[in-house]
Image: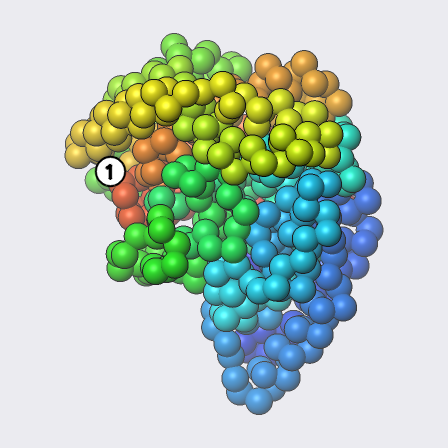
Amino acid sequence: MTDLHWMTAAAAAKAIASRELSPVELTAALLTRIERLDPRLNAFIRIDGDAAMAAARTAEAEIASGRSRGPLHGVPVGIKDIIDVAGLPTTCHSRILADSLATSDAVCVSKLRGAGAIVLGKLSTHEFAIGGPSHDLPWPPARNPWNTDHHPGGSSSGSGSGVAAGLFPMALGSDTGGSVRNPASCCGIVGLKPTYGLVSRRGVFPLSFTLDHIGPMTRTVADNALMLEVLAGHDVHDPGSAAVVSGHYSAGVDRDVRGLRVGFVRHFHEIDMPADPEVTAALAHVARTLQLEGAEIRDVHLPTLEEFGAVNRVILQSEAWAIHAPWLRKRPGDYGQLARRRLMAGAFFGAGDYVQAQRRRLEMIAAVEEVLRDVDVLLCASSMDPACRIDSPADIERTYPRQARTPFNVTGHPAIAMLAGVSAGGLPLSVQFVGRYFDEATLFQVARGWERASGSDKKHPAIV
């Protein structure tokens, strides 16, 4: 077990349960790696090393006495810093909340702890999950471990960077317009936006009430399914939570894809927003590979990316303005320039704009539902380009909107982004799979089929 930093969450939990691996040994090894690499990556806003080691010692004692808390017993996790961890600040990477101290865990954190996970600390994000990457904030932006001159995606940037770099095997992110799947795409890991309402958002600072999701970020599909089994469940105190039966996401992960119908949304990256040729080639390769594995590939059509983007923008910025208006009026200078500009745009939408966007949203949901009656899963682009340089505002402005993630925040369908290949420049290329409501199990099955055939889970950045 020399490469503990590349150990999956599932493998670590199994080794800890059988007493082949000590939670103290694992946590100490990851904290040592964090100490060495994080000054280059900026994945953390705050490392809670003493508390993590204390939790690891407790986990070790529990195993020695024959007790296990659950399927993640002794496994470290990183938490995006818009999510409450008791006793730690929830800064949202902003001066506005620099001194804000959480008095209790968010529900998602509480569930992870209940399953035995060990919290390592709070992770970098774009300011309030919208403004970044910003260089005018109290903490620097996270960087991409495949090339630290490049952007790691956002807004769950520290989560994506840290998982990819082997600082921790799993992390929590949030996704309002693609913020779990963007860093998953840029950093070559597995990021899931679950069905809207499947995972409680209580204790998470909101960006958009009707678009926000909490999702797991891991290096493998199996770990993602394992995390979701812990996180999913109805929360009567979250108004958006869905009262549905959840679980059993891991049971069918390794079933083959033979006979599954995969709808390929080619027009997203071929017509609506022409992708980089390397992305186009990677997506074609994913489709061919799944076909060789026994899946049926069909071309399907949805509303255009332009339409989806417009609806997402009106809803997100309107709801974000409702949250931030008091601070923006009283303390505009305490925001970073990017967050201030993006949040203030919401002041210029009227009630009619918001109502019409919500009406069009229902039509878009119906359109996706109609297509998913004839196929089991959708295949489409995530990012249209590899990650750009982090020091080029023009490139970030140009490439950030070039994506196909926001459609599924608008509709609420589950969507997973993962590695599709590596560019000639040594940066991850990505693919996205989308499923029916609450059918994450089939989504994991297809994602694992691609992962198994391609070996994408064995590819890591060269950072050491």
Q: Amino acid at mark 1?
A: Asp
Against 169, residue 40 (above or below) is above
Residue 140 falls in which quadrant of the image?
A: top right
Does residue 392 sit above or below 210 in this rendering? Answer: above
Question: Where residue 444 sits: x, y (%)?
Answer: 37, 47
| Residue 31 shown left or right of residue 376 in the figure | right
- Residue in front for this viewpoint, 267 or 138: 138
Q: Answer above or below: position of 116 versus 207.
A: below
Q: Residue at x 73, y 34 (%)?
A: 334
The colour scheme is rainbow
In the image, 403 versus 381, the foreground residue is 403
**Residue positioned 28% across, 47% down in the render:** 439
Asked whether the viewer can see residue 237, the reply is yes
Horizontal and vertical percent position of residue 405: 44, 29
User: At 69% from the left edge and 34% from the top edge, which residue is drawn?
Assistant: 331
Q: Position of residue 137 (x, y in %)?
A: 76, 35
Query: Does the rendering let one see residue 404?
Result: no
Q: Quadrant of the N terminus?
A: bottom right
Q: Which secondary structure lies at badge 1?
A: loop
Mark 1: few/some/many CA within 10 Å (<14, 14-19, 20+): many
In the image, residue 352 lies at what x, y percent?
34, 20
What residue did someone put label 1 on? 376
In the image shown, does 121 or 103 lie closer to the viewer?
Answer: 103
- 105 or 46, which lies in front? 105
Question: What residue is at 49 percent from the left and 50 percent from the top?
Answer: 216
What is the number of callouts on the image?
1
